[in-house]
Amino acid sequence: MCEYFVKADPIQYEQRTRTIRIHGVLTSIRLENMVWDILAEMAEEEQCTTNHLVVTFHDEILAHRGEVPNFASFLRVTCMRYLRRKLIAAERALPNAPSPALPASASKIVAMATRP
């Protein structure tokens, strides 16, 4: 299993800083390229820009929690939860057919990830 992960393109985990205006305040957010790519995919699904999506997440977490203690980590976890939700939906759509794009242990990973 480790071989699958260690063969990841280093560009994916290289970090990039983007400056985003949140209610008139410029904020720099440093995330891995892969996280920015997933946020862009999520924004495309929502038919908005990545910056708009990030501001929306900031507003929603602020409204829900009253503070945003570690926004970059929140965005990383949001991306992981998004991917997990997509994987679960794909597995439910094809309950008896393994997905060739996923490693053989994907069902085990999903089962572990969805435990309460």
Image (cartoon, rainbow, N blue to C red):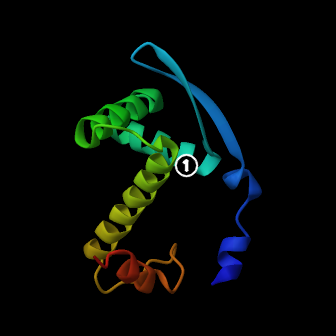
Return the x and y of residue 37 as percentages of the image width and height. 55, 45
Q: Which residue is drawn at 32% across and 70% down?
A: 88
Circle 1 residues within 10 Å: few <14, some 14–19, many ≥20:
many
- Vertical placement of residue 38 versus 99, above or below: above
- Vertical placement of residue 50 versus 5, above or below: above
- Residue at image mark 1: 35
- The residue most toward the top is 24
Residue 84: quarter of image: bottom left
Q: At numbered mark 1, what does the secondary structure look like: helix, strand or loop? A: helix
> Is residue 14 shown left or right of residue 1?
right
> Is residue 26 shown left or right of residue 83?
right
Q: What residue type is labelled 1?
A: Val
- Vertical placement of residue 25 versus 109, above or below: above
> Is residue 10 shown left or right of residue 63?
right
Return the x and y of residue 9 as percentages of the image width and height. 73, 59
The front one of 74 and 50 is: 74
Q: Which residue is drawn at 43% across and 42% down?
A: 69
The front one of 100 and 29 is: 29
Return the x and y of residue 65 as percentages of the image width and height. 27, 43
Q: Which residue is drawn at 39% across and 29% down?
A: 55
